[in-house]
Image (spheres, rainbow, N blue to C red):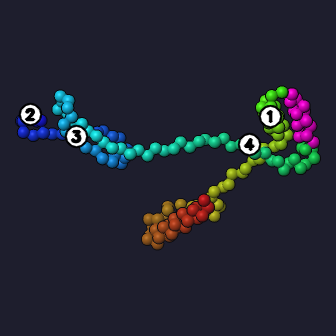
Amino acid sequence: MAPDGQHTNMIDMVLIDRKLKTSVRNCGTYQGADVSSDHSRVLAKVQLRLKRNQKQGTRSKQWKVETLKTKLIRIAYATAIQGNLEQVTEQHLDQRVERLKTGIVDTIKQTVPDKIKPNKLWISDNTLQLAKKKRQLKQRIRESDTMRQQYKHKCRETRSAARRDK
């Protein structure tokens, strides 16, 4: 109730962050709460869309297994694995399996080289040449309207070439 006794103002509100304001579905006040206060109860329905956490998976190491076809690497691998398998003497089955697994992986790390995946260049030389010509035209864009049109055409051409390269 305002000081003049005639007007009532509802100043009870819900504060919400700007990026969450689209999450508010319904908001309203409810009179008649049996508390000795001049405030009203404010109720807001909010629907949140939570983002799922993506697991950061660890990729297993890949080795060039085809190198085992060469005689020298195959003999080195066979002797190393033989030495590791002779050291396995555990009685418990789970410990034995774990020891075998670590022995094989250690032997592979020692004898077989890693598989290296080369990074693909995503942009071609043709697209780079188009971008260079576009930059040259941009410097001369104020000379005439035909230069402006050539520049726009070269921009479209460069953009479509870059999309093809992706």
Residue 20 lies within the magenta run: no
Q: How crowded is mark 1: few (under 14 residues within 10 Å), some or many (20 or more)?
A: few
Residue 61 tag number: 4
- The mark nearer the N terminus, 2 or 3, is 2
Q: In which quarter of the image is residue 8?
A: top left
Q: What element carries label 1?
A: helix
Residue drawn at 92 percent across, 44 percent down:
72
Give the x, y percent position of residue 29.
Answer: 23, 41
Q: Quadrant of residue 97?
A: top right
Q: Which residues fall within the magenta stretch?
A: 75-90
Residue type highlighted by circle 1: Val
Toward the viewer: 149 or 23? 23
Give the x, y percent position of residue 46.
Answer: 35, 44
Residue 30 tag number: 3
Toward the viewer: 158 or 2? 2
Q: Which residue is at the far bottom?
A: 146
Marks 1/3: CA–CA distance = 67 Å
Marks 2/3: CA–CA distance = 22 Å
- The mark nearer the N terminus, 1 or 3, is 3
Residue type highlighted by circle 3: Tyr
Which of labels 4 and 1 is toward the front? 1
In the image, residue 133 sits, relative to residue 67, either above or below, namely below
Give the x, y percent position of residue 66.
Answer: 84, 50
- The mark nearer the N terminus, 4 or 2, is 2
Which of labels 2 and 3 is toward the front? 3
Q: Name the residue under label 1.
A: 97
Residue type highlighted by circle 2: Pro
Residue 3 tag number: 2
